[in-house]
Protein backbone atom coordinates (compact mmCIF):
# COMPACT_ATOMS: atom_id res chain seq x y z
CA UNK A 1 0.00 0.00 0.00
CA UNK A 2 1.31 3.46 -0.95
CA UNK A 3 2.27 5.82 1.91
CA UNK A 4 -0.53 8.23 0.94
CA UNK A 5 -3.09 5.41 1.02
CA UNK A 6 -1.74 4.24 4.40
CA UNK A 7 -2.03 7.75 5.81
CA UNK A 8 -5.58 8.08 4.46
CA UNK A 9 -6.55 4.76 6.08
CA UNK A 10 -5.11 5.85 9.43
CA UNK A 11 -6.87 9.21 9.18
CA UNK A 12 -10.13 7.45 8.36
CA UNK A 13 -9.74 5.16 11.35
CA UNK A 14 -8.98 8.14 13.61
CA UNK A 15 -12.12 9.92 12.43
CA UNK A 16 -14.31 6.88 13.17
CA UNK A 17 -12.85 6.66 16.69
CA UNK A 18 -13.57 10.36 17.15
CA UNK A 19 -17.17 10.06 15.97
CA UNK A 20 -17.67 6.88 18.01
CA UNK A 21 -16.90 8.76 21.20
CA UNK A 22 -18.68 11.97 20.24
CA UNK A 23 -21.04 11.47 23.18
CA UNK A 24 -18.13 11.95 25.61
CA UNK A 25 -18.06 15.71 25.01
CA UNK A 26 -21.76 16.15 25.75
CA UNK A 27 -21.53 13.96 28.86
CA UNK A 28 -18.56 15.97 30.17
CA UNK A 29 -20.54 19.14 29.43
CA UNK A 30 -23.54 17.79 31.33
CA UNK A 31 -21.26 16.87 34.24
CA UNK A 32 -19.88 20.43 34.36
CA UNK A 33 -23.41 21.84 34.42
CA UNK A 34 -24.65 19.44 37.12
CA UNK A 35 -21.62 20.23 39.30
CA UNK A 36 -22.01 23.97 38.59
CA UNK A 37 -18.30 24.26 37.82
CA UNK A 38 -18.69 27.46 35.80
CA UNK A 39 -20.72 29.04 38.61
CA UNK A 40 -18.10 28.06 41.19
CA UNK A 41 -15.28 29.68 39.19
CA UNK A 42 -17.42 32.73 38.44
CA UNK A 43 -18.25 33.21 42.15
CA UNK A 44 -14.55 33.63 42.93
CA UNK A 45 -14.21 36.42 40.40
CA UNK A 46 -11.09 34.96 38.82
CA UNK A 47 -8.92 31.87 38.29
CA UNK A 48 -9.09 29.21 41.04
CA UNK A 49 -7.39 25.94 41.94
CA UNK A 50 -8.81 22.46 41.59
CA UNK A 51 -9.32 22.26 45.36
CA UNK A 52 -11.26 25.51 45.29
CA UNK A 53 -13.47 24.11 42.53
CA UNK A 54 -13.99 20.96 44.61
CA UNK A 55 -14.85 22.94 47.74
CA UNK A 56 -17.72 24.61 45.86
CA UNK A 57 -19.31 21.31 44.77
CA UNK A 58 -22.37 20.21 46.70
CA UNK A 59 -20.69 17.17 48.28
CA UNK A 60 -19.04 16.42 51.59
CA UNK A 61 -16.32 14.34 49.94
CA UNK A 62 -15.83 15.11 46.22
CA UNK A 63 -13.42 12.80 44.38
CA UNK A 64 -10.53 15.09 43.41
CA UNK A 65 -8.87 12.74 40.86
CA UNK A 66 -12.18 12.29 39.05
CA UNK A 67 -12.70 16.06 39.01
CA UNK A 68 -9.18 16.58 37.65
CA UNK A 69 -9.88 14.24 34.74
CA UNK A 70 -13.17 15.97 33.95
CA UNK A 71 -11.43 19.35 34.00
CA UNK A 72 -8.64 18.04 31.74
CA UNK A 73 -11.22 17.03 29.15
CA UNK A 74 -13.11 20.32 29.40
CA UNK A 75 -9.89 22.34 29.10
CA UNK A 76 -8.93 20.39 25.98
CA UNK A 77 -12.30 21.37 24.46
CA UNK A 78 -11.75 25.03 25.43
CA UNK A 79 -14.69 25.04 27.83
CA UNK A 80 -12.27 26.24 30.53
CA UNK A 81 -8.63 27.36 30.45
CA UNK A 82 -5.82 26.33 32.77
CA UNK A 83 -2.47 27.90 33.50
CA UNK A 84 0.32 27.72 36.04
CA UNK A 85 0.92 30.89 38.05
CA UNK A 86 4.35 32.57 37.71
CA UNK A 87 5.28 31.58 41.27
CA UNK A 88 4.95 27.88 40.37
CA UNK A 89 1.87 27.22 42.50
CA UNK A 90 -1.12 25.00 41.71
CA UNK A 91 -2.83 24.97 38.31
CA UNK A 92 -5.51 27.64 38.02
CA UNK A 93 -8.77 27.21 36.10
CA UNK A 94 -10.64 30.07 34.48
CA UNK A 95 -13.83 30.71 32.51
CA UNK A 96 -13.83 31.21 28.74
CA UNK A 97 -16.40 32.90 26.51
CA UNK A 98 -17.75 29.36 25.98
CA UNK A 99 -18.20 28.44 29.64
CA UNK A 100 -19.99 31.72 30.35
CA UNK A 101 -22.95 30.10 28.56
CA UNK A 102 -22.95 27.47 31.35
CA UNK A 103 -23.73 29.90 34.18
CA UNK A 104 -27.06 28.95 35.77
CA UNK A 105 -28.23 32.46 36.66
CA UNK A 106 -26.87 34.37 33.68
CA UNK A 107 -29.28 36.51 31.67
CA UNK A 108 -28.55 34.25 28.69
CA UNK A 109 -27.66 30.64 29.50
CA UNK A 110 -27.73 27.30 27.70
CA UNK A 111 -27.86 25.31 30.95
CA UNK A 112 -31.51 24.17 30.59
CA UNK A 113 -30.86 23.04 27.01
CA UNK A 114 -27.76 21.05 28.02
CA UNK A 115 -29.74 19.34 30.77
CA UNK A 116 -32.72 18.52 28.55
CA UNK A 117 -30.87 17.21 25.51
CA UNK A 118 -28.64 15.01 27.69
CA UNK A 119 -31.43 13.67 29.90
CA UNK A 120 -32.06 9.92 29.67
CA UNK A 121 -35.60 10.59 28.45
CA UNK A 122 -34.25 12.52 25.45
CA UNK A 123 -31.30 10.24 24.78
CA UNK A 124 -33.33 7.02 24.56
CA UNK A 125 -34.99 7.81 21.16
CA UNK A 126 -31.58 8.24 19.51
CA UNK A 127 -31.05 4.50 19.91
CA UNK A 128 -34.12 3.90 17.71
CA UNK A 129 -32.98 5.72 14.55
CA UNK A 130 -31.88 2.51 12.82
CA UNK A 131 -35.20 0.90 13.66
CA UNK A 132 -37.01 3.94 12.18
CA UNK A 133 -35.03 3.62 8.92
CA UNK A 134 -35.95 -0.09 8.68
CA UNK A 135 -39.65 0.15 9.47
CA UNK A 136 -40.62 3.84 9.72
CA UNK A 137 -42.38 5.25 12.74
CA UNK A 138 -41.48 7.75 15.44
CA UNK A 139 -38.28 7.27 17.44
CA UNK A 140 -39.62 8.91 20.62
CA UNK A 141 -42.70 6.69 20.53
CA UNK A 142 -40.60 3.57 20.04
CA UNK A 143 -38.54 4.53 23.10
CA UNK A 144 -41.33 5.71 25.40
CA UNK A 145 -44.59 4.28 24.08
CA UNK A 146 -46.07 7.67 23.16
CA UNK A 147 -45.14 10.82 21.27
CA UNK A 148 -43.19 13.59 22.99
CA UNK A 149 -46.10 16.00 23.38
CA UNK A 150 -48.24 13.30 25.03
CA UNK A 151 -45.29 12.35 27.23
CA UNK A 152 -44.96 15.97 28.36
CA UNK A 153 -48.67 16.30 29.14
CA UNK A 154 -48.52 13.23 31.41
CA UNK A 155 -45.14 13.94 33.00
CA UNK A 156 -44.86 17.26 34.90
CA UNK A 157 -41.11 16.82 35.47
CA UNK A 158 -40.40 16.34 31.77
CA UNK A 159 -42.81 19.17 30.94
CA UNK A 160 -40.80 21.54 33.17
CA UNK A 161 -37.44 20.40 31.78
CA UNK A 162 -38.73 20.88 28.24
CA UNK A 163 -40.33 24.29 28.91
CA UNK A 164 -37.20 25.54 30.68
CA UNK A 165 -35.06 24.50 27.71
CA UNK A 166 -37.41 26.17 25.23
CA UNK A 167 -37.49 29.33 27.35
CA UNK A 168 -33.69 29.60 27.47
CA UNK A 169 -33.27 29.17 23.71
CA UNK A 170 -36.15 31.57 23.11
CA UNK A 171 -34.40 34.24 25.16
CA UNK A 172 -31.15 33.79 23.22
CA UNK A 173 -32.76 33.72 19.77
CA UNK A 174 -35.24 36.49 20.58
CA UNK A 175 -32.42 38.80 21.60
CA UNK A 176 -31.08 38.49 18.07
CA UNK A 177 -34.53 38.67 16.43
CA UNK A 178 -35.46 41.85 18.29
CA UNK A 179 -32.16 43.48 17.35
CA UNK A 180 -32.23 42.43 13.68
CA UNK A 181 -35.97 42.54 12.92
CA UNK A 182 -37.15 45.59 14.89
CA UNK A 183 -38.74 47.23 11.84
CA UNK A 184 -40.71 44.06 11.08
CA UNK A 185 -42.92 44.50 14.17
CA UNK A 186 -43.57 48.22 13.64
CA UNK A 187 -46.83 47.93 11.69
CA UNK A 188 -48.21 44.97 13.66
CA UNK A 189 -51.10 45.80 16.01
CA UNK A 190 -51.77 42.29 17.28
CA UNK A 191 -49.50 39.27 17.24
CA UNK A 192 -50.12 35.61 18.07
CA UNK A 193 -47.12 33.54 19.15
CA UNK A 194 -48.08 30.03 18.07
CA UNK A 195 -46.43 27.41 20.24
CA UNK A 196 -45.23 30.19 22.53
CA UNK A 197 -44.79 27.98 25.59
CA UNK A 198 -45.08 29.98 28.79
CA UNK A 199 -45.09 33.32 26.96
CA UNK A 200 -41.49 34.46 27.28
CA UNK A 201 -41.03 35.27 23.61
CA UNK A 202 -44.21 37.28 23.07
CA UNK A 203 -43.54 39.14 26.33
CA UNK A 204 -40.13 40.24 25.01
CA UNK A 205 -41.69 41.39 21.73
CA UNK A 206 -44.41 43.37 23.52
CA UNK A 207 -41.85 44.89 25.89
CA UNK A 208 -39.83 46.14 22.92
CA UNK A 209 -42.97 47.17 20.98
CA UNK A 210 -45.63 48.20 23.56
CA UNK A 211 -48.20 49.03 20.87
CA UNK A 212 -48.59 45.31 20.10
CA UNK A 213 -51.39 43.29 21.67
CA UNK A 214 -49.69 39.98 22.43
CA UNK A 215 -51.39 36.58 22.45
CA UNK A 216 -49.48 33.53 23.69
CA UNK A 217 -51.03 30.42 22.13
CA UNK A 218 -50.10 26.88 23.11
CA UNK A 219 -51.57 23.62 24.36
CA UNK A 220 -53.75 23.96 27.50
CA UNK A 221 -51.32 22.05 29.77
CA UNK A 222 -48.51 24.38 28.66
CA UNK A 223 -50.29 27.72 29.15
CA UNK A 224 -51.64 26.43 32.48
CA UNK A 225 -48.14 26.91 33.90
CA UNK A 226 -47.56 30.31 32.24
CA UNK A 227 -47.03 33.31 34.54
CA UNK A 228 -48.91 36.60 34.21
CA UNK A 229 -47.09 38.78 31.68
CA UNK A 230 -47.80 42.44 30.99
CA UNK A 231 -49.46 43.06 27.63
CA UNK A 232 -49.90 39.34 26.96
CA UNK A 233 -52.99 37.14 27.13
CA UNK A 234 -52.60 33.36 27.31
CA UNK A 235 -54.86 31.22 25.14
CA UNK A 236 -54.94 27.43 25.24
CA UNK A 237 -55.87 25.50 22.15
CA UNK A 238 -54.74 23.31 19.26
CA UNK A 239 -52.98 24.88 16.27
CA UNK A 240 -54.24 22.03 14.09
CA UNK A 241 -57.82 23.11 14.81
CA UNK A 242 -57.72 26.91 14.81
CA UNK A 243 -55.42 29.84 15.63
CA UNK A 244 -56.60 33.14 17.19
CA UNK A 245 -57.05 36.03 14.74
CA UNK A 246 -54.37 38.72 14.61
CA UNK A 247 -52.51 41.08 12.28
CA UNK A 248 -49.56 38.70 12.21
CA UNK A 249 -48.59 35.22 13.36
CA UNK A 250 -45.21 34.47 14.94
CA UNK A 251 -43.73 30.96 15.08
CA UNK A 252 -40.26 30.21 16.40
CA UNK A 253 -38.97 26.67 16.00
CA UNK A 254 -42.49 25.26 15.62
CA UNK A 255 -42.75 24.02 12.04
CA UNK A 256 -39.51 22.05 12.22
CA UNK A 257 -41.26 19.81 14.76
CA UNK A 258 -43.75 18.55 12.18
CA UNK A 259 -44.05 16.73 8.86
CA UNK A 260 -44.88 18.60 5.65
CA UNK A 261 -48.55 17.61 5.85
CA UNK A 262 -48.79 18.80 9.46
CA UNK A 263 -47.02 22.06 8.56
CA UNK A 264 -49.38 22.76 5.68
CA UNK A 265 -52.32 22.31 8.03
CA UNK A 266 -50.80 24.72 10.56
CA UNK A 267 -49.94 27.27 7.87
CA UNK A 268 -53.44 27.10 6.39
CA UNK A 269 -54.84 27.87 9.84
CA UNK A 270 -52.39 30.78 10.06
CA UNK A 271 -53.67 32.04 6.71
CA UNK A 272 -57.25 31.95 8.01
CA UNK A 273 -56.24 33.92 11.11
CA UNK A 274 -54.66 36.92 9.32
CA UNK A 275 -55.90 39.56 6.88
CA UNK A 276 -55.60 38.57 3.22
CA UNK A 277 -53.96 41.83 2.13
CA UNK A 278 -52.01 43.10 5.11
CA UNK A 279 -51.34 39.99 7.21
CA UNK A 280 -48.11 38.06 7.43
CA UNK A 281 -46.62 35.02 9.12
CA UNK A 282 -43.21 35.46 10.74
CA UNK A 283 -41.37 32.13 10.87
CA UNK A 284 -38.13 31.80 12.83
CA UNK A 285 -36.66 28.48 11.79
CA UNK A 286 -33.58 26.82 10.37
CA UNK A 287 -32.76 26.96 6.67
CA UNK A 288 -30.35 24.21 5.68
CA UNK A 289 -27.51 24.93 3.27
CA UNK A 290 -25.86 21.63 2.40
CA UNK A 291 -22.53 22.99 1.19
CA UNK A 292 -22.15 25.84 3.68
CA UNK A 293 -19.54 25.88 6.46
CA UNK A 294 -20.81 28.80 8.53
CA UNK A 295 -20.54 29.17 12.28
CA UNK A 296 -23.83 27.36 13.01
CA UNK A 297 -24.10 25.03 10.01
CA UNK A 298 -22.95 21.88 11.82
CA UNK A 299 -25.51 22.58 14.54
CA UNK A 300 -28.22 23.12 11.94
CA UNK A 301 -27.47 19.70 10.44
CA UNK A 302 -27.51 18.16 13.93
CA UNK A 303 -30.93 19.70 14.51
CA UNK A 304 -32.29 17.78 11.52
CA UNK A 305 -31.43 14.44 13.17
CA UNK A 306 -32.66 15.84 16.49
CA UNK A 307 -36.06 16.32 14.87
CA UNK A 308 -35.97 12.71 13.70
CA UNK A 309 -35.24 11.51 17.22
CA UNK A 310 -37.73 13.63 19.14
CA UNK A 311 -40.61 14.77 16.95
CA UNK A 312 -43.54 13.45 14.94
CA UNK A 313 -42.06 13.60 11.46
CA UNK A 314 -40.27 16.89 12.08
CA UNK A 315 -37.28 17.98 10.01
CA UNK A 316 -35.15 20.94 9.03
CA UNK A 317 -35.64 22.29 5.52
CA UNK A 318 -33.74 23.89 2.65
CA UNK A 319 -35.04 27.10 1.08
CA UNK A 320 -36.54 25.10 -1.79
CA UNK A 321 -38.43 22.91 0.69
CA UNK A 322 -39.70 25.99 2.54
CA UNK A 323 -40.86 27.55 -0.74
CA UNK A 324 -42.82 24.44 -1.68
CA UNK A 325 -44.38 24.22 1.79
CA UNK A 326 -45.49 27.86 1.79
CA UNK A 327 -46.91 27.69 -1.72
CA UNK A 328 -49.00 24.63 -0.88
CA UNK A 329 -50.41 26.45 2.15
CA UNK A 330 -51.38 29.51 0.09
CA UNK A 331 -48.42 31.81 0.72
CA UNK A 332 -47.26 32.92 -2.71
CA UNK A 333 -44.57 35.34 -1.53
CA UNK A 334 -41.86 35.07 1.08
CA UNK A 335 -38.71 36.88 2.16
CA UNK A 336 -35.72 35.40 4.01
CA UNK A 337 -33.83 37.53 6.51
CA UNK A 338 -30.58 35.97 7.72
CA UNK A 339 -29.61 36.76 11.31
CA UNK A 340 -26.50 35.85 13.36
CA UNK A 341 -27.92 32.82 15.16
CA UNK A 342 -29.04 29.26 14.34
CA UNK A 343 -32.42 30.02 12.66
CA UNK A 344 -33.32 32.63 10.04
CA UNK A 345 -36.47 34.74 9.71
CA UNK A 346 -38.95 33.92 6.94
CA UNK A 347 -41.72 36.42 6.24
CA UNK A 348 -44.61 34.74 4.42
CA UNK A 349 -47.47 36.63 2.74
CA UNK A 350 -50.81 35.21 1.52
CA UNK A 351 -51.47 35.33 -2.21
Image (spheres, grey):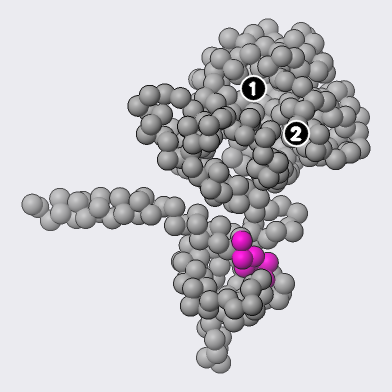
Q: Position of residue 4 (x, y in %)?
A: 16, 53
The answer to which quarter of the image holds residue 271 is: top right
Q: Tell me the residue at 59%/40% (across/down).
A: 342
Image marks 1 and 2: residues in contact by CB distance under 8 Å: no
Mark 1 or mark 2, which has the lower sequence index? 2
Left or right: residue 179 compared with residue 81: right
Query: Quick check: 279 above or below 77?
Result: above
Which residue is situated farthest in the bottom direction here?
Answer: 87
Q: Nearer the viewer, residue 283 or 124?
A: 124
Residue appearing at x 54%, y 86% in the figure? 90
Q: Which residues are magenta?
A: 34-40
* Number of marks present in the image shown: 2
The question of residue 38 being in magenta is answered with yes
Graded by Cα atoms within 10 Å as few (under 14), some (14 to 19) or many (20 or more), the crowding at tag 1 reads few
How much space separates mark 1 and mark 2, taking CA atoms?
Answer: 31 Å
Q: Which mark is residue 335?
A: 1
Report x, y in % for residue 236: 79, 25
Which disc number belongs to residue 222? 2
Say if residue 208 shows up in the picture.
no
- Which numbered dot is residue 231? none
Residue 75, compared with residue 350, is above or below; it is below
Quarter of the rendering occupied by the C terminus: top right
Tell me the crowding category of disc 2: few under 14, some 14 to 19, or many 20 or more residues within 10 angstroms, Cα based: many
- Residue 241 visible, this orientation: yes
- Residue at image location 50% in from the left, 20% down from the top: 320
Amino acid sequence: MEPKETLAMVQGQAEIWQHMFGFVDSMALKCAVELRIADIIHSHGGPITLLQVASGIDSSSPDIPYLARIMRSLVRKNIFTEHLPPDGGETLYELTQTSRWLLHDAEQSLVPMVLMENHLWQLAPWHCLGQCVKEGGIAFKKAHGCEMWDFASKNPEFNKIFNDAMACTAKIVMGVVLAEYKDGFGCVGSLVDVGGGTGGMIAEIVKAHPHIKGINFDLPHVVATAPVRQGVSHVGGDMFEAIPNADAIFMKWVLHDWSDDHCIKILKNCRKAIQQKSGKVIIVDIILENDSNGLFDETRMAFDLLMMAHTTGGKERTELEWKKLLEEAGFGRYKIIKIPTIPSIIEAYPE
